[in-house]
Image: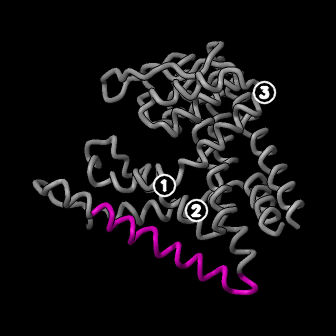
Amino acid sequence: MLTIIMVMCAIFLDFLLGGPRRYHPLAGFSRLVSYLEKRFYPPKGRRPRHFLFAGILGWCILVLPFVCLSWWLITLPFIAIPASIAGLSLALGGQSLTEHALTVQSALEAGNLRYARERVAAMVKQESRGLDEVGVCRAAIGSVLENGNAALFAAIFWFVMLGLPGVVLYRLTNLLADMWDDRDVHYVYFGRAVSRINHALNWVPARLTGLTYVLVGGDWRHTKALAVQAKQWQDRNAGWLIACGAGGLALKLGGPVINHGDEITRPWLGRGNTPTVKDIGRSIRFVQQGLWLWLGLLFLFGWLNA
């Protein structure tokens, strides 16, 4: 039950305060990654295995010391609980995700498509210059559904499983995988190990989150079809999240995108209507309803085992 109370306190802090506007620990970690990357990235001409080894070594040096530090903190009698709540709160990004998505929605409602494209580019890994209003809506909603897992559900899952060390391991690995994305030619080998670790850490939470989206949507009839769609996506974790979320919202997401001037063919996910501006806000409420469902189930589980 103590773990459930800590989760609720951390969510409340994230909702009340959001992330620190300045000096956020994750921003500091990003700067540390950029600094050390210059020293670990092998020179041109080295073999792929050198890049693979350097990436593994980089992950060990950047992530594992913080995991060990968090493990030490939870052994201290008067520090363990406050440190755990603060650590989980800093790992959560629900309020930040909401603010980013609502900024895109506000820009579209004001008729400022150019600014909406700029803001959605900060949420997704694709070019946004050629997106029309529907394309911006699709990208924003897809990002809310996918990042709802990373910013909320997966962080909570690993906190419940392994406490503060679990959420530190997950969140730092997830951020590092975003920075060393192996779909980028520059990181194709260097970031491969981190990408695989991140995929493994996300495998169970992504499927639980997808099932949560199906539950919130209230329609199980198309779950098998959504699972088939998800397998066609390059990243099956992301495909499962977006497919289930789109199905729950009765929207049609995904589709081809332009990246570095080239059109990338992607399957359509979900079913139903073409998304509109109002659906961005609806997707945020959809994720929040899933969060309430998790909290209810966690409280019930804690109460039954008390």
Residue 166, quarter of picture: bottom right
Please name the residue that numbered disc 1 is placed on. 175
Q: Residues in magenta?
A: 54-79
Q: Within 10 angstroms of label 1, few (less than 14), some, or many (20 or more) residues?
A: some
Q: Distance between the residues labelled 3 and 1?
A: 32 Å
Does the magenta segment cover residue 57? yes
Looking at the rendered structure, the secondary structure element under dot 3 is: loop
Which residue is at a point 69% across and 62% down the rendered structure image?
A: 160
Amino acid type, label 3? Gly
Please name the residue that numbered disc 3 is placed on. 218
Which residue is at a point 65% across and 47% down the rendered structure image?
A: 96
Please name the residue that numbered disc 2 is placed on. 24
Q: Do the residues labelled 3 and 1 touch (CB within 8 Å)?
A: no
Q: Report the side of 104 relative to 255 (left or right).
A: right
Looking at the rendered structure, the secondary structure element under dot 2 is: loop
Q: Report the side of 193 relative to 282 (left or right).
A: left
Amino acid type, label 2? His
Q: Within 10 angstroms of label 2, few (less than 14), some, or many (20 or more) residues?
A: few
Instruction: Choose mark 1 or mark 2, whichever is in front.
Output: 1
Vertical comparison of 3 with 17: above or below: below
Instruction: Choose mark 3 or mark 2, whichever is in front.
Output: 3
Residue 29 place in picture, x, y as percent: 48, 64
Q: Which of marks 1 and 2 is nearer the N terminus?
A: 2
Q: Can residue 101 be seen in this view?
A: yes
